[in-house]
Image (tube, rainbow, N blue to C red):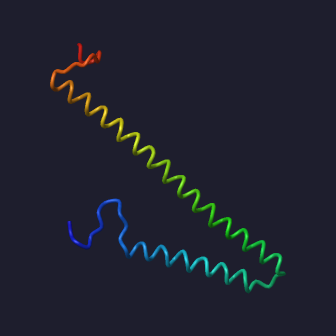
Amino acid sequence: MHANTAPSGQHSPAWITFTYASFTFSVLMVATGILFAPVDVWIKAYFAMAAALLVQSSITVTKTLRDVYEGHRFVNRIEDAKAERLLMELERGNGSGHPIAAS
């Protein structure tokens, strides 16, 4: 593996910088649009509150989806380890009371 190549599953520093910059730019664009909108102050406040809640809920949904995915990955790793252990026991001839090994 090359020194400047990120390991599998890791993001490069350039990608991380890009995501922070694009998020910051989009928030600034929305804030500028709300600030200079030709509407009353209470409507601007409503739009600002809605935009803040949209960002917060997007972060929450993203975190929840990631947690669910990682939870499934963890369960699959446990099941794979159990299956591997069972196969190793069968290979060694160590039945350990399993009905499959007894036959």
Q: Compared with residue 54, is residue 37 higher up or lower down, i.e. above or below?
A: below
Numbered marks: total: 0
Q: In which quadrant is the C terminus drawn?
A: top left
How far across and down, in percent of the image, does residue 6 sit? 30, 67
Quarter assignment of residue 26: bottom right
Vertical position of residue 14 compared to residue 95: above or below: below
- Say which quadrant the N terminus sits in: bottom left
Q: Residue furthest front?
A: 96
Say if 17 sits above or below 71 in the image: below
Name the residue rendered at 63%, 60% in the picture.
57
Task: State which quadrant residue 10 falls in.
Answer: bottom left
- The image shows residue 25 at horizontal and vertical percentages of 56, 80
Q: Nearer the viewer, residue 90 or 30?
A: 90
Dividing the picture into quadrants, the one containing residue 31 is bottom right
Q: Residue at x 72, y 68 (%)?
A: 50
Residue at image coords 30%, 36%? 81
Residue 10 as seen in the image, left or right of residue 90: right
Farthest left residue? 92
The residue at 68%/70% (across/down) is 51
Return the x and y of residue 43 as percentages of the image width and height.
81, 75
